[in-house]
Image (spheres, rainbow, N blue to C red):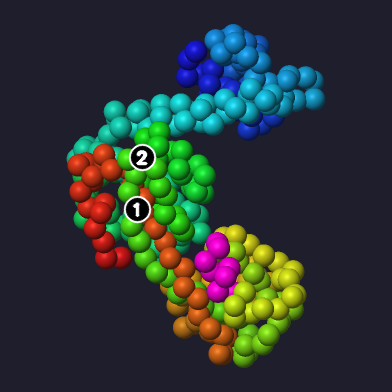
């Protein structure tokens, strides 16, 4: 088994087609087939059902997929750490919920780079499920998520509390239900606060799981939504958005989880860093 075969397998899974995978890998289709044959022979299992219409995962292929992703990323991490730029002595790998990046994760990353210039930084988009496996496998050093993670050799602490405020493209007061309301799902805790304060049976016609996407839609199409206060400050000042009068704010807690064995390399992990 070699890394090029695993990378080819992942390319076929992404593209669902051997021809497109060959173009992506810049090899011939016969080379793609040969690599897949070798990988399946090494594992003793059929990973893909290949046909003229494309390629689909078998049960065994689906089982192997997560491990293949771990191996490929571990290889990429190893290459990165071996070829560090001048003046950099280590790499900090952070898995971050995309909904926590703007105004929180990004500011923290900037602070790390300023205070620890000898540390290179790589950030990966992650949800709870893949962040858990990445931490356990050592693929990432820490994860910034909306909930703490547990498990062997991992430690969590509250990271920051974020205020969520309801803003609108037009000045208005809070009402029980508004047809242009955009729902943003921030997880179970905020969902409970939302239900307690807005117990309407009506469902929003548009919903997002990412506040950046929700704000982009709001600015383009109009409406109202609960957004992180730090994301809206300039837009409120400029008059592009307006805070909805009498709408209660919500609070969203974020958590930082890291591998315990990384504290020697990154002794600042257990401590708050002002952002």
Residue picked out by circle 2: 152
In this view, 235 is above or below 260 = below
Residue 205, given in percent of the width and then of the height, sits at: 74, 69
Q: Check residue 272 for magenta coloring.
A: no
Toward the viewer: 51 or 70?
70
Residue 36, given in percent of the width and then of the height, sits at: 61, 15
Q: Is label 2 in a helix, a strand or a loop?
A: loop
Picture mark count? 2
Of the 4 image quadrants, the one containing the C terminus is bottom left
In this view, 212 is above or below 124 = below
Residue at figure coordinates x 64%, y 69% from the top left: 183
Disc number for residue 156: 1
Residue at figure coordinates x 52%, y 44% from the top left: 129
**248 with respect to 143 (left or right):** right
Magenta stretch, residue numbers: 187-194
Give the spatial CA distance, label 2 vs label 1: 12 Å
Residue 139 visible in this rendered orientation of the protein:
no
Q: Nearer the viewer, mark 2 or mark 1?
A: 2
**133 with respect to 191 (left or right):** left
Q: Is label 1 in a helix, a strand or a loop?
A: strand
Pointer 1 local density, CA inside 10 Å: few below 14, some 14–19, many at least 20:
many
Which picture quadrant has residue 199?
A: bottom right
Disc number for residue 56: none
In this view, 234 is above or below 109 = below
In this view, 152 is above or below 1 = below
Residue at figure coordinates x 74%, y 78% from the top left: 179
Residue 166, given in percent of the width and then of the height, sits at: 56, 79
Task: Look at the magenta stretch and give its main secondary structure.
Answer: helix
Toward the viewer: 124 or 184?
184
């Amino acid at each position: 088994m070699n890394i090029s075969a695993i990378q080819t397998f992942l390319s076929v899974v992404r593209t669902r087609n051997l021809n497109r995978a060959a173009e992506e890998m810049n090899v011939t289709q016969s080379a793609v087939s040969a690599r897949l044959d070798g990988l399946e022979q090494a594992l003793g299992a059929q990973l893909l059902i290949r046909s003229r219409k494309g390629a689909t995962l078998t049960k065994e292929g689906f089982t192997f997929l997560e491990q293949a992703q771990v191996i490929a990323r571990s290889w990429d991490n190893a290459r990165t750490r071996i070829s560090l730029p001048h003046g950099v002595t280590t790499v900090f790998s952070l898995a971050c919920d995309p909904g926590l990046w703007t105004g929180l994760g990004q500011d923290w990353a900037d602070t790390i780079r300023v205070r620890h210039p000898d540390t290179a930084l790589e950030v990966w988009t992650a949800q709870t499920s893949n962040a858990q496996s990445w931490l356990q496998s050592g693929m990432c050093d820490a994860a910034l998520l909306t909930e703490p993670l547990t498990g062997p050799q991992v430690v969590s602490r509250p990271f920051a509390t974020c205020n969520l405020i309801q803003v609108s493209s037009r000045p208005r007061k809070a009402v029980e239900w508004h047809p242009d309301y955009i729902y943003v799902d921030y997880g179970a805790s905020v969902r409970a606060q939302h239900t307690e304060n807005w117990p309407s049976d009506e469902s929003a016609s548009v919903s997002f799981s990412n506040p950046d996407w929700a704000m982009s839609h709001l600015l383009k199409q109009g409406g109202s939504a609960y957004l992180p206060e730090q994301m809206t400050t300039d837009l409120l000042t400029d008059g592009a958005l307006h805070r909805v009068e009498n709408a209660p704010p919500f609070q969203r807690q974020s958590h930082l989880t890291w591998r315990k064995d990384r504290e020697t390399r990154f002794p600042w992990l257990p401590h708050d860093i002002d952002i």
